[in-house]
Amino acid sequence: MILSQDRILTTLAGSLPRPDDLVELLLAQDGGAGDDAALAPRVRQAVADVVAQQVDAGIDIVSDGEMSKISYVNYLKHRLDGFGEEASLDWSAQDIDEHPGYGATLGGPLEKRPTGGPPACRGPLSVRDRSLLDDDLANFSAAVSASPPAGGAFMNAASPGVVAQFMPNKFYPDDDAYIEALGDVLQEEYEAIVGAGFQLQLDCPDLAMGRHMVFAGRPLDDFRARARHIVEVLNHATRNIPPEAMRLHICWGNYPGPHTHDVPVADIADIIFQVRPQYLLFEGANPRHAHEWEEWAGLDIPEDKVLVPGVIDTNSNHVEHPKLIAQRLCHYADIVGRERVIAGTDCGFATLASLPRVWPSIAWEKLRALAEGAALASERLWPRVSSRVE
């Protein structure tokens, strides 16, 4: 079990800015014109570099930055059979719909996106190519050996619910059956990540953002019923993995919108608390959710859960002051105790393999601020052990 035993540990939600030349290779691969001979060594080097950068920035629990992935969901179309022709999504973000002029600006000319739309599920799901996952595990293992992190390492994997949201069902009798099939086929990836010695991070933004997207305008109980089913599927798919070897990340959508229809955390917390993963990562820094530490203070948080609040915003190029980061961390330490708090980020810094919302050099500045803020919080929470940070 990873706990903040003598200081607040630091981590992140996963993705980090990819080098420009790697982005071009990933976009080509996604469009079916990839150069595997060039891509494989470039990914290997990028993973080694990004792990070393995280360690240098003061991040204790590191990721591979998702260097090999076109996005945190669409990467699966290269690894699983059953996905085919693209399909239009039948939902949109309720908050953006209310401001269509602003929405039109979100895909600006500088933003490179995957070459096609999301593929749909058009046949029975099965594992097509285990070698891509094995390459990820080997690259990450080598990088962590070369640049050992202080607190461990984790690897992201898409959850059944988020795949169902972005890669729509056109084959199974209903979405519940589709989500269950996804859980069955993704189990191998989940267990392989843990078997390689890493924590598994299940990316589950659908458990929050699905409310104002897929379930916009529908009763809250409908969304809660879907969320309960997704949690049941997740728990079944991870039944062979110890809870302390898993993290779960929820968010309300990693995009710079008004977020005026985000479901309050108090409306979904009882369902989130049913997940098997011990570590809960969630947004706590952006202007729409920074106040919610007060909501967490009023929740019946299970004693086995460790909170990993986002204390830096991944959509703003403002660099948070370390004192603000420390204040946020201390709020959560007051709720569950200092040992059960780890400093995190709201979301990833590069959800798509494209130009990130936060400029790459600023993303690293934010991570250094995260480490400084965690050190300040540690000084307050363990005054006799922590060294002073100027």
Image (cartoon, rainbow, N blue to C red):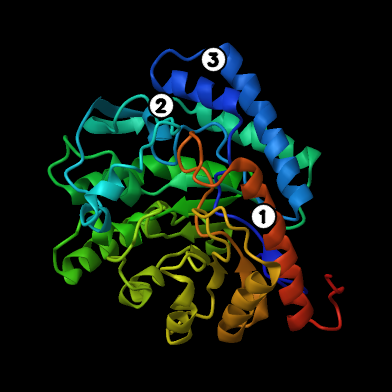
Q: CA distance from mark 1 to mark 3?
A: 32 Å
- SS for tag 1? helix
Give the residue number, with chain letter if any, for mark 3.
Answer: 36
**Nearer to us in this view, 248 or 312:** 312
Task: Look at label 1 and name its amino acid.
Answer: Leu
Mark linked to residue 79: none
Task: Look at label 2 and name its amino acid.
Answer: His
Give the residue number, with chain letter if any, for mark 1.
Answer: 367
Image coordinates for residue 10, horizontal then vertical, percent: 67, 61
Name the mark nearer the viewer: 1 or 2. Answer: 1
| Crowdedness near tag 1: few (<14), some (14–19) or many (≥20) residues, C-alpha within 10 Å | many
Image coordinates for residue 166, horizontal then vertical, percent: 29, 42
Image coordinates for residue 171, horizontal then vertical, percent: 16, 35
Q: Earlier in the sequence, mark 1 or mark 3?
A: 3
- SS for tag 2? helix
Pointer 1 and pointer 3: residues touching (CB < 8 Å)?
A: no
Where 4 falls versus 253 (above or below)?
below
Q: CA distance from mark 2 to mark 3?
A: 13 Å
Residue at x 42% of width, y 29% of height: 79
Residue at x 41% of width, y 23% of height: 30
Locate the N terminus by quadrant: bottom right
Pointer 2 and pointer 3: residues touching (CB < 8 Å)?
A: no
Where 120 falls versus 209 (above or below)?
above
Image coordinates for residue 116, horizontal then vertical, percent: 32, 26
**Nearer to us in this view, 358 or 77:** 358
Q: Earlier in the sequence, mark 2 or mark 3?
A: 3
